[in-house]
Image (cartoon, grey):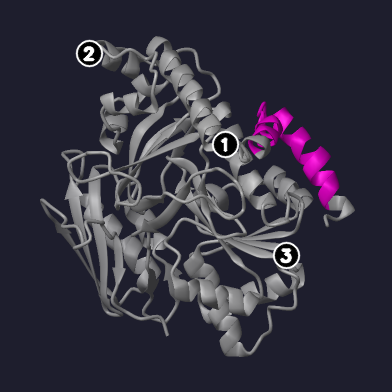
């Protein structure tokens, strides 16, 4: 049962906040809470209507798709979801090369974003108010599946510079009113972990949110120190942005005394799927069409493993249509026992970003190194391998824009995080090989955290 303050936030304060930002989040969430119970056929019909509207809009308003449809002779008045297969896939390269042409003519609500770079290919793109409203609504709906709501105390363990770099006074006030506290996940030294545990115990959150590896590491530290964390009333731990391993789930659930709710999505692809309390990873089907493809680009049947491709139906002003995520997954033919008709992701594979260990024993999230490299001009792809505490090797695939001076900038940035005495080799290569699974890993540490 929600507290009076939580009810005030979720019913009055947060809706007012969203209206001021010209978002339709509340209306969208209320609609989603009805549509999640529709029959599969009704849901697919809704997807088709949304797809028709999106394709017809982008034909007339988005230069990239106006030209593409003309070139292909493609009719946006599709009569089946399968008609999507007549369109080519969208990758990061196409967006980078045609960035301005992906913006809808006259769109005034676009905000610039970029990916975290864990895929090795940081991407600049834009998001409009429609997309934000739908993504926030989808996350909000999934939050409520676990009997928590906006306004319940939340502790966020995160590492994105978008969040960590925007802690101005207005945001600080907003977070205080919404009862959200942010802990930076980059550094995991013993002192930091002690502080995180103390803050969590003092704050007594109803929900945790963060990287599974970060929450598992905090849990392990509390367990090692003999500090109880299962007496705080935490109801759920939401995890995302990495592959959730079984040992991490067990450790988080055991130490914090709450279930773990896995989520899958990204800044670029949107809020794709979230686990409900019955265990199903529900796709946000009202907004997201998911295809699974093989290495040749053929759409695979349900139950077979392949690359996840998404079409986000709320992206009129900067479209993501048949966008290749680079992740590998499997769709599930079953429906969830919770009774919702939203289709299920059976598994998502290969989204792990390792922790790395500095020379002094400090444990940091792999993104701490990724952020050193991702915004360097001319870096097309990279791989970071921590061979030992004393040696880290970086492979770079570069374009003509890359300057030789950037090698020293990268080396210094890595040394600032791992230690001045660590040897850092930066090699320019023509190709970076994938793992045997076909999935790229961009941060690999051969040093086990102690």
Residue 156 point in image, percent of width and height: 62, 59
Which one is in front in this view, the residue at disc 1 or the one at disc 2?
1
Against 369, is 445 above or below? below
Mark before the other along the chain sequence, 3 or 1: 1
- Determine crowd level at label 1: few under 14, some 14-19, many 20+ residues with C-alpha closer than 10 A: some
Residue name at image x 65 percent, y 70 percent? 258
Image quarter of the N terminus: bottom right
Question: Marks 3 and 1, Cα distance to the nearest angstrom?
Answer: 36 Å
- Determine crowd level at label 3: few under 14, some 14-19, many 20+ residues with C-alpha closer than 10 A: many
Question: Marks 2 and 3, Cα distance to the nearest angstrom?
Answer: 54 Å
Q: In this view, does 332 lie to the left or right of 129?
A: left
User: What span is in magenta?
Assistant: 6-32
Residue 437 point in image, percent of width and height: 23, 61
Q: Name the secondary structure under disc 1.
A: loop
Q: Nearer the viewer, residue 199 or 322?
A: 322
Residue name at image x 69 percent, y 83 percent? 228
Residue 71's label in the rendered image is 2
Mark before the other along the chain sequence, 2 or 3: 2
Which one is in front in this view, the residue at disc 3 or the one at disc 1?
1
Which one is in front in this view, the residue at disc 2 or the one at disc 3?
2
Residue 359's label in the rendered image is none
Residue name at image x 29 percent, y 56 percent? 409
Q: Name the secondary structure under disc 2.
A: helix
Magenta segment, prevailing SS (helix, strand or loop): helix
Residue 303 point in image, percent of width and height: 34, 52
Question: Marks 1 and 2, Cα distance to the nearest angstrom?
Answer: 37 Å
* Residue wearing tag 3: 205
Image quarter of the C terminus: bottom left
Q: Name the secondary structure under disc 3.
A: loop
* Residue wearing tag 1: 39
């Amino acid at each position: 049962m929600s507290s009076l303050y939580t009810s005030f936030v979720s019913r009055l304060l947060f809706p007012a906040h969203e209206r001021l930002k010209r978002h339709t989040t509340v209306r969208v969430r209320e609609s989603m809470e009805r549509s999640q119970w529709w029959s599969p056929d009704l849901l697919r019909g809704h997807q088709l209507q949304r797809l028709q509207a999106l394709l017809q809009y982008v034909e007339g308003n988005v230069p990239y798709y106006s030209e593409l449809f003309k070139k292909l002779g493609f009719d946006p008045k599709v009569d089946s979801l399968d008609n999507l297969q007549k369109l080519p896939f969208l990758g990061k390269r196409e967006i980078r090369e045609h960035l301005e042409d992906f913006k809808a003519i006259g769109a005034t609500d676009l905000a610039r974003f970029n990916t975290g770079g864990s895929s090795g290919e940081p991407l600049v793109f834009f998001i409009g108010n429609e997309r934000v409203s739908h993504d926030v609504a989808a996350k909000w709906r999934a939050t409520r599946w676990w009997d928590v709501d906006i306004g319940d105390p939340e502790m966020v363990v995160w590492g994105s510079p978008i969040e960590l770099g925007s802690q101005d006074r207005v945001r600080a006030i907003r977070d205080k009113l919404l009862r959200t506290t942010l802990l930076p996940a980059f550094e995991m030294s013993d002192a930091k972990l002690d502080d995180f545990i103390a803050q969590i115990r003092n704050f007594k959150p109803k929900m945790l949110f963060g990287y599974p590896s970060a929450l598992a590491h905090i849990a392990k530290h509390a367990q090692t120190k003999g500090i109880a964390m299962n007496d705080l009333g935490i109801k759920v731990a939401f995890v995302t942005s990495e592959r959730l391993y079984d040992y991490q789930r067990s450790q988080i659930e055991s130490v914090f005394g709450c279930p773990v709710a896995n989520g899958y999505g990204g800044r670029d692809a949107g809020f794709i799927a979230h686990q409900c309390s019955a265990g199903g990873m529900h796709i946000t089907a009202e907004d997201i069409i998911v295809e699974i493809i093989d290495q040749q680009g053929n759409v695979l049947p349900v139950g077979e493993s392949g690359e996840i491709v998404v079409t986000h139906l709320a992206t009129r002003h900067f479209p993501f249509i048949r966008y290749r995520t680079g992740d590998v997954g499997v769709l599930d033919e079953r429906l969830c026992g919770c009774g919702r008709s939203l289709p299920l992701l059976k598994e998502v594979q290969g989204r792990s970003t390792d922790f790395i260990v500095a020379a002094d024993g400090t444990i940091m999230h792999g993104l701490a190194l990724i952020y050193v490299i991702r915004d360097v001009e001319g870096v097309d792809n990279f791989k970071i391998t921590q061979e030992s505490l004393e040696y880290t090797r970086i492979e770079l695939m570069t374009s003509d824009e890359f300057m030789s001076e950037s090698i020293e900038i990268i080396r210094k940035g890595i040394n600032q995080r791992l230690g001045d005495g660590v040897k850092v080799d930066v090699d320019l290569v023509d190709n970076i090989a994938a793992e045997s699974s076909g999935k790229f890993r961009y941060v690999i540490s051969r040093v086990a955290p102690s």
